[in-house]
Image (spheres, rainbow, N blue to C red):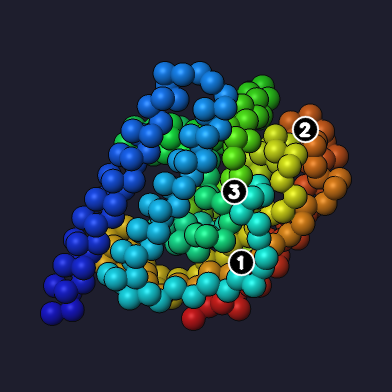
């Protein structure tokens, strides 16, 4: 009986989310039509602000859907003070595709709308393509360490592409978001990496550092630690509500002055110092996740 009930919940949750996204992105598409016609900077800035507001309402709709369908079981531990008129950098651990919903809801009305760096390979997905066009969420190429060793010029190309993408964030207060691990964590990847952390993969700091290089007005890094009660991580498990019990801890870090306005691709000392700083945060995060476990 429970199996039938949970599958029904999963089906209707999926339908409601799809409808909410169609309405949200449909509205965003209509609002942003003038951007493609009139190349005025002032218009783009105004439309960016309107788009962010629509994005916030769309996230609120998702929040209501999760609350109704899954019974609100999310615990968010956030005693920080934020300013929605400021720019932020945010990071998180990554375990499931459902993380994006959890993080959007946890950050809702606390900081400006999260802007995700998205893999270019996902551009074929309609909602992701529209997020790029209407909410200024940039596509990026993800290169492996082996690829960079084989062709070091890729590092400079990635840096230039990130700089270009971040210019779009300057139009209105935003939160640039990056999964620092670079991929979803699981036992196989954790073992393959021989990660020194109990609950995390080794952080990839290049993307974060490059984004900060392009956004000198960012002074604060926001770190989200997400812990699920269940070990299930699939899309259907999330839609059914099997992943409803979740804890999210939010910590705020001031970015050291010596880590601002640097070029990650050419400044070796900066790369070293930035890595040390993030690794320190990662050690704290590993302990925080252990503390949050159900």
- Quarter of the picture containing the N terminus is bottom left
Marks 3,2: beta carbons within 8 A? no
Marks 1,3: beta carbons within 8 A? no
Q: Residues within 10 Å of mark 2 (few under 14, many from 20)?
A: some
Q: Residues within 10 Å of mark 1 (few under 14, many from 20)?
A: some
Query: In percent of the image, x 80 and y 36: which residue is there?
Result: 262
Residue that numbered label 3 is attached to: 175
Q: Is residue 22 above or below residue 73?
A: above
Mark 1 vs mark 3: which is more N-terminal? 3
Q: Position of residue 181 (x, y in %)?
A: 58, 51
Distance of label 1 from label 3 (alpha carbons) = 14 Å
Residue that numbered label 2 is attached to: 263
Q: Is residue 194 above or below residue 122?
A: below
Q: Is residue 82 above or below residue 274?
A: below
Nearer to me, 286 or 59: 59
Dot 3 falls on a residue whose secondary structure is strand
Relative side of 256 to 107, left or right: right
Query: In percent of the image, x 81 and y 45: which residue is there?
Result: 259
Mark number displayed over residue 250: 1
Nearer to me, 88 or 260: 88
Mark 3 vs mark 2: which is more N-terminal? 3
Mark 2 vs mark 1: which is more N-terminal? 1
Query: In percent of the image, x 57 and y 65: which residue is there?
Result: 225
Disc number lying in front (2 or 1): 1
Q: Is residue 178 visible?
A: no
Nearer to me, 254 or 264: 254
Q: Position of residue 261 (x, y in %)?
A: 80, 37
């Amino acid at each position: 009986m429970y199996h039938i009930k949970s599958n029904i919940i999963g089906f209707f949750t999926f339908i409601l989310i799809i409808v909410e996204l169609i309405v949200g992105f449909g509205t965003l598409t209509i609002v942003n039509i003038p951007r493609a016609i009139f190349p005025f900077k002032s218009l783009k800035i105004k439309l960016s602000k309107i788009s962010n507001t629509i994005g916030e309402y769309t996230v609120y709709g998702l929040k209501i859907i999760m609350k109704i369908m899954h019974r609100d079981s999310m615990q968010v531990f956030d005693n920080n003070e934020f300013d929605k008129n400021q720019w932020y950098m945010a990071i998180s651990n990554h375990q499931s595709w459902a993380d994006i919903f959890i993080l959007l809801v946890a950050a809702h009305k606390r900081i400006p709308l999260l802007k995700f760096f998205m893999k270019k390979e996902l551009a074929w997905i309609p909602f992701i393509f529209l997020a790029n066009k209407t909410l200024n969420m940039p596509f990026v190429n993800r290169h492996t360490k082996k690829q960079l060793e084989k062709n070091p010029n890729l590092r400079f190309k990635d840096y230039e592409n990130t700089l270009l993408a971040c210019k779009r964030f300057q139009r209105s207060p935003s939160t640039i978001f990056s999964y620092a691990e670079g991929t979803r964590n699981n036992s196989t990847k954790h073992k393959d990496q021989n990660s020194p952390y109990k609950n995390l993969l080794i952080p990839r700091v290049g993307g974060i550092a490059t984004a900060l290089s392009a956004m000198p007005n960012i002074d604060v890094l926001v770190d989200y630690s997400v812990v699920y009660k269940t070990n299930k991580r699939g899309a259907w498990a999330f839609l059914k509500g099997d992943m409803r019990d979740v804890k999210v801890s939010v910590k705020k870090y001031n970015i050291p002055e010596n880590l601002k306005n640097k070029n990650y691709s050419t400044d070796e000392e900066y790369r070293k110092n930035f890595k040390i700083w993030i690794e320190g945060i990662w050690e704290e995060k590993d302990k925080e996740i252990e503390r949050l476990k159900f």
